[in-house]
Amino acid sequence: MKSAFITGISGQDGAYLAKFLLDKGYEVHGGVRRISQQSDTRLRKLGIAGDVKLHDFDLAESNGIARVIRLLQVDEFYNLAAQSFVGSSWDLPIYTSDVNGLGVARILDCLRTYSPHTRFYQASTSEMFGLVQDVPQRETTRFHPRSPYGVSKAFAHYMTVNYRESFDMHASCGILFNHESPLRGVEFVTRKITTNLARIARGGKEPLQLGNLDSRRDWGFAGEYVEGMWSMLQQQKADDYVLASGVTTTIRDFVNFSGQALDMEIEWVGSGVQERGLDRKTGATIVAVDPTYYRPAEVGLLLGDASKARDVLDWTPRVTIKDLASMMAISDYDALH
Ligand code: NAP
Ligand code: G4F
C-alpha cells in the first residue's frame, strides 16, 4: 500500500486529492492547523473524514514539519497548504511569504535530510505569470508576479526546482490555473457568485457586490486538476507542468452562466462602478459593483497552454465552464433547501 501526506487537506484541493488517493488504495495522512475553522468539513462532504489520518501541522513550524516527515516516511508528499487568497496578500505580505515561501524551503530541507526517497509535489500557480509575458502561458513562459502571493509562490517554485537540481530529489511543480468546485472557499469570486445567486434565487433581496467584472480567468474543475497532481508524481523523472482549461471567461459571464443554471436572466446596464446586473423578470438589482473589491494590481490575460500535461501525463480537462458554473450554483441552491 502506498502512503501520502497532504498539507492543506482541509482545503478544496486537499479534500479532492485525499478522496482520489483513497480510491487508489493509498494510506492518506493530512496536516491540519490547530486554528483551522473547518478542519474536516470538506472531508465530511466527500464522505472520507474517518478514512484519513490527521496530524497537527503548520507551515510556519519547522519542528512539526520535521516530525511528520521523519515519522511517516511517506512515498508521496503533496504541499497544498498556503495563504491562498491573493486579495489578502497585500495586507499580509510577511505572513504570506513566510507560509507560502519559507514553508516550502522548510519542507524541502526536511525531506532532503530525513526522507530523501519521498516524491514531492508543490502547488505552484498561474499567479506567477502575473503581468503576462506571453499568451497563452506555458512552462517556459517568464514569471512576472503581481501580488505578494504570486511572489511567494515564485520563490517556492524556484526553491523546488533548485532542490530537484541540487540534490536529485523527485520534486515537481504543478503550475495550476484557477480551479473551482462546490468545495471552493466562499471568498473566491466563483463561489461568492454562486452562493449569493443561490441566496437571491431563494428570495434574498441584498444584491451581490463584486469588484472588477471585466477581469478574466482560465477556470477548470478542481476534481480533475488533482488527478494531474498525482500523475506528475508517477513519472520516472520529476518536472513542472501547466494544468489549465485553455478557455478564458470574464467574471460577468461567470455570473451569467451561474444565473442561467438557477433560471435567472441577467441584463447588464451602466458601466464602471455604475454597472449593475438586473433581473430581467422583476427589474430588481441582482449585482452591483463595489470598488473596495478592486485590487492594487491586476494580472494580465491568464490563459494556460496545458499541451505538455496532455502529451506526457495524458491529462485533459473535461468539465466546461458552463458545466462548472452550473454544478456550483445548483449545489449552493440545494444547500439552502
Ligand atoms: P484552500 O482551499 O484555500 O486551502 C488552503 C489550505 O491551506 C487549507 O487547508 C488551510 O488550512 C491550509 N493552510 C493555510 N495556512 C496554513 C499554514 N500556515 N500551515 C498549514 N496549513 C495552512 O486552497 P486550494 O484552492 O485548495 O489550493 C490548494 C493549493 O493550490 C494552495 O497552495 C493554492 O495556493 C494553490 N493553487 C490554487 C489554485 C486554485 O485555483 N484553487 C490555483 C493554483 C494554485 P485551514 O483550514 O487551517 O485554513
Ligand atoms: O477568485 P479570485 O479571488 O481568484 P484569484 O485571485 O485568481 O486566485 C485564485 O487563483 C490563483 C490561480 O491563478 C490561485 F493561485 C489562488 O490561490 C486562488 O485560488 O479572483 C479572481 C478574479 C480577480 O481578478 C478579482 O479581481 O476575480 C476578480 N474579482 C472581482 N470581484 C473578485 C471579486 N475576486 C474576489 N475574490 N471577490 C470579488 O468580489
Image: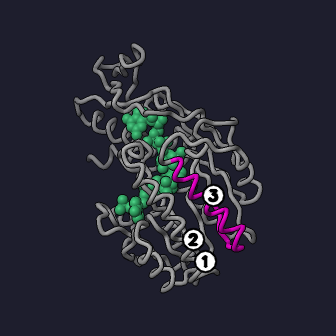
Task: Indicate which disc, 1 or 3, sits on the residue closer to the N terminus.
Answer: 1
Give the quarter the ligand 1 occupies: bottom left
The image shows residue 317, relative to residue 77, as above or below, that is above
Along the line of sight, the residue nearer the viewer: 43 or 188? 188
Task: Name the mark on residue 158.
Answer: 3
Q: Looking at the magenta stretch, what is its main secondary structure?
A: helix
Q: Are the residues tagged 2 and 1 within 8 Å (C-beta)? A: yes
Amino acid under disc 3: Tyr
Neighbour tally class for label 2: few under 14, some 14-19, many 20 plus, Cα within 10 Å: many
Farthest-out residue, top: 270
Give the spatial CA distance, label 2 vs label 3: 12 Å
Amino acid under disc 2: Leu
Give the spatial CA distance, label 2 vs label 1: 6 Å
Looking at the rendering, in which quadrant would you find the N terminus?
Answer: bottom right
Please say whether residue 24 is one of the residues in the magenta stretch: no
* Element at label 1: helix
Magenta part of the protein: which range? Answer: 150-174
Q: Is residue 283 visible?
A: yes
Neighbour tally class for label 1: few under 14, some 14-19, many 20 plus, Cα within 10 Å: some
Along the line of sight, the residue nearer the viewer: 318 or 134? 134
Q: Are the residues tagged 1 and 3 within 8 Å (C-beta)? A: no
The residue identified by callout 2 is: 108
* Element at label 3: helix
Task: Name the mark on residue 316.
Answer: none
Q: Position of residue 27 (x, y in %)?
A: 51, 80
Q: Position of residue 199 (x, y in %)?
A: 28, 38
* Quadrant of the image occupied by residue 2: bottom right
Task: Name the mark on residue 112.
Answer: 1
Q: How is the image coloured?
A: one colour
Task: Indicate which disc, 2 or 3, sits on the residue closer to the N terminus.
Answer: 2
